Amino acid sequence: MCGIVACIGKRRAAPILLDGLKKLEYRGYDSAGIAVSEGGAVVLARRKGAVSQLEFARAYPGTMGIGHTRWATHGAPCERNAHPQTCGRIFLVHNGILENAAALKKECREQGEVFASDTDTEVAAHLIDRYFREGGDLLHAVWSACRQLVGSYAFAVIAEGREEIVCARRHSPLVVAKGDGEAYAASDLGAVAGAGRTACVMEDGEFARLTQEGIALFDADLASVVRDFFPAGEEAAAPEKGTFRHFMRKEIAQVPLAVENTLSGLQNQDISKLIEVLCQTKYLHVVACGTAYHSGLCFKYAAEKLSRVPTEVFLASEYRYADPVLPDHTLTIAVSQSGETADTLAAGQLAGERGSPVVAVTNVEHCSLNRIADFVVPTCAGQEVAVAATKSFNAQLAALYYLAVALARGRGMRAPSLAGLPVLTHEALLAGEGVAAWTPYFTVARSAFFLGRGADRCAAIEGSLKLKEISYLPSEGYAAGELKHGTLALVDARTPVVAVVCDETLADKTMNAVHEVYARGAPVFLVTPFEELARSEQVTASVLIPRCEPAFSPMLSVIPLQLLAYHVALALGRDPDKPRNLAKSVTVE
Ligand code: G6P
């Protein structure tokens, strides 16, 4: 998926587009492009690589344009596959996937049309160009083309000789905003917010025409629709690294604040209706992807332990096609940092259709997931820039543990307080710095293992994901007791093993696995609050984190693992903020 931006007004478009694209780079950064219209002629600039490669185009004249930052789906990341894609007088940017692109291209080719790229998007430009030449109306041409498209799209389209931008949305996010004599569109609000502006999140199936005079919205039949615009005056300040070398490192340092803000935000918010529904719930389902899925696993452990309510955690991409069984009185919690992940959105929607109330746990106020949910539980991590989720994971845990505690207490059970967690995360952060010394064992490794039992296993899986996504070192998070049933065959002296041991009742069992890998020559690293375990002769090095209620311990134990991934990535010369092939928000299937 990708980020798109468009603007029309009195000011020069190129700087607005480039600054907007920088705010959207979390959605992809393998190539970028803009098209700017000046006196009816459109100038195109596209480059492989990050948005910064387009700085040469900042001086382009023209007050209308479109821009794109790409995460390749169809076609390798290169200049000719970068957007805007073009055909005839049409230029367009696209976020989404056109599933019938191959069939449509074949049809176009049979009529003698030639394609310049490998993208699915180009075929939309061909169709729009065809209808535009026939009818001369850009909005109608885009609408006609969209009727032929299967899949997901957020489009912004311009045509040579026209002072208007036409947008269309289906299953990909798109926000429009207007100010004094100017109009904007973008994949997220942050890229279009600004002093004196108002904005509106387009609905699926809607079209928009942007001109200097304002924004006209249309439904799927092109009938005019009137929508409320909300103030969008807070221009999101471009996040800064400050004294840190990378956003990821800064965001790990912000974990205690993220946890504190999330907990105090929930304490100060009236969520009594949600708590009421929660306490009547017989089954809890969590749907999520990536790191958010791992926070769901941690929640399952805490919720079942504290409240005894059966809790299932589903990968949203599996759930949506699994014909899931939702018993009566099931509450579904959809967890997503961005609130835009296509699979999580679809899973939440499906749960709602099957009669379950849906709770969105998200970090972005005006996101799509919040709009389809019955209840919203905000995480207050602040904007997260690095692709690898860190502080947002801890903030998700804070919010989910809050619900687990409320549920337990609502059912008349005792549950520990969460009040100490912000301070404890701070202590874990200080202690976690010790992992920098482990780095040499990982830079020469062939692969790594992260082991744990119970809640520790959940932290281990997330630690493993962090390492592989930013260092590219093959790594697995595994149930400590399961290792011996096959996976142990992979362990040798070049396989560092990190064991997470925070639950005293399971410590001896996990240490059995430590003995087993040690016996095969693996260097062993421990994340634990227990000093005597850290002193074991099998342990190469350890980080001592504070003790806390075992059900909540991933909140602390994950911090050294986040730092480990960061240090290993740095030592291997990777960019921890922008790992290859990944994007922060995945709005396609
Ligand atoms: C992408 C990101 C992951 C993230 C996942 C889910 O794959 O690279 O870091 O965990 O999406 O994102 P969400 O916004 O739904 O939490």
Image (spheres, rainbow, N blue to C red):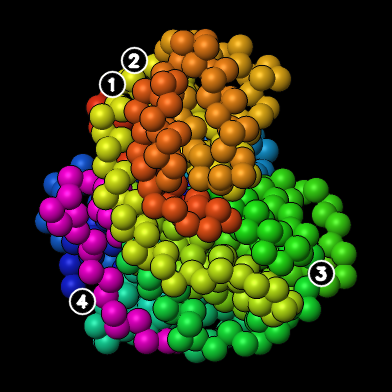
- Mark linked to residue 282: 3
Callout 2: helix, strand or loop? loop
Which is more foreground, mark 4 or mark 1?
1
What residue is disc 4 on? 10
* Image position, residue 142 (x, y; %): 54, 62
Callout 4: helix, strand or loop? loop
Say which label, 4 or 1, has the lower sequence index: 4
Callout 1: helix, strand or loop? helix
Say which label, 4 or 2, has the lower sequence index: 4
Residue type indicated by callout 1: Pro
State which quadrant residue 7 falls in.
Answer: bottom left
**The magenta stretch spans residue 173:** no
What residue is disc 2 on? 444
Callout 3: helix, strand or loop? loop
Which is more foreground, mark 3 or mark 4?
3
Do residues under tags 1 and 2 come within 8 Å of each other at their CB atoms? yes
Residue type indicated by callout 2: Val
Residue type indicated by callout 4: Lys
Do residues under tags 2 and 3 come within 8 Å of each other at their CB atoms? no
State how far apart marks 1 and 2 are (Cα).
Answer: 7 Å
What residue is disc 1 on? 440
The region drawn magenta spans: 229-254
Do residues under tags 3 and 4 come within 8 Å of each other at their CB atoms? no
Instruction: Please tell me which residue is depicted at 58% across the width and 84% down the height of the picture.
Output: 271
Q: Residues within 10 Å of mark 4 (few under 14, many from 20)?
A: some
Instruction: Please tell me which residue is depicted at 52% across the width and 12% down the height of the picture.
Output: 519
